[in-house]
Image: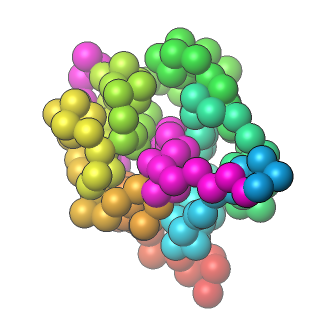
Amino acid sequence: MQALSSPADIQLLILDADGVLTDGGIYVDDAGCETKRFNVRDGFAIRAWLQAKKEIAVITGRGGMALRHRLDGLGVKNLISASGPKKKVLEELLKNLNISASHTAALGDDLPDVPMLKMVGYPMAVADAVDEVKAAAKWHSTKNGGHGAVREAVEFLLKSSGEWDSAVEAWG
């Protein structure tokens, strides 16, 4: 396990998609088209994170364009979908971004996230995460995935570094 960092030291935030950015539900219509529901407050928080000149990435085991469209609208460039083992993907991402794992936080909800959480300096879990994720996490949201947990995590991290107010003011 990575030595735990202060939340104020975080430069990269990794998010899982299903169960973190969404409530984990997958909507499939009669034509087989898949859609997802995203929380607008999570979107604002992602923009505030980027406004603070920090990096963000989404690593998810699933594919699909709904997530890509949402992230494009928010300005998120780093999406690794249909990723396979997340720890290996995260190692490559850290190398490409030249950011250490100790300056990285990850927010997860389910078992595929555990190796990634154990690797980063600040592991985080959504309120409705499975027990193993909660056990690996240093911080837990009070909100469930897809219902403002990302907003809560970003606000916590940016307030810890004293950057929340200036990131929010940029949108006012």
Q: Position of residue 47 (x, y in %)?
A: 62, 64
For residue 79, which quarter of the picture? top right
**Where residue 7 sits in the image (x, y, percent)?**
31, 46
Residue depicted at 31% across the width and 64% down the height: 143
Q: From the viewer's perspective, is 135 left or right of 153? A: left
In the rendered image, residue 127 lying in the magenta stretch gets the answer no
Residue 75 visible in image: no
Q: Relative to residue 137, is residue 153 depicted above or below? A: below
- What residue do we see at 62% from left, 77% from top? 170
- Left or right of residue 115: residue 163: right
- Camera-nearest residue between 19 and 166: 19
* 28 versus 118 height, above or below: below
Residue pictured at 58% horizontal, 17% vertical: 84
Q: Does the magenta stretch include residue 17?
A: yes
Q: Residue at x 63, y 33 (%)?
A: 62
Q: Which of 8 and 35 is in front in this view?
A: 35
Which residue of the protein is positioned furthest toward the top in this rendering? 88
Which residues lie in the magenta part?
Answer: 1-29
Q: On screen, 2 above or below 73?
A: above
Q: The N terminus appears in which quarter of the rendering?
A: top left
| Above or below for 129 versus 81 | below
Q: Position of residue 108 (x, y in %)?
A: 39, 40
- Left/right placement of residue 172 relative to residue 147 reads right
Note whether residue 148 is visible.
yes
**For the C terminus, which image quadrant?**
bottom right
In the rendered image, the residue lying farthest to the bottom is: 172
- Which is nearer the eye, 116 or 159? 116
Total marks drawn?
0
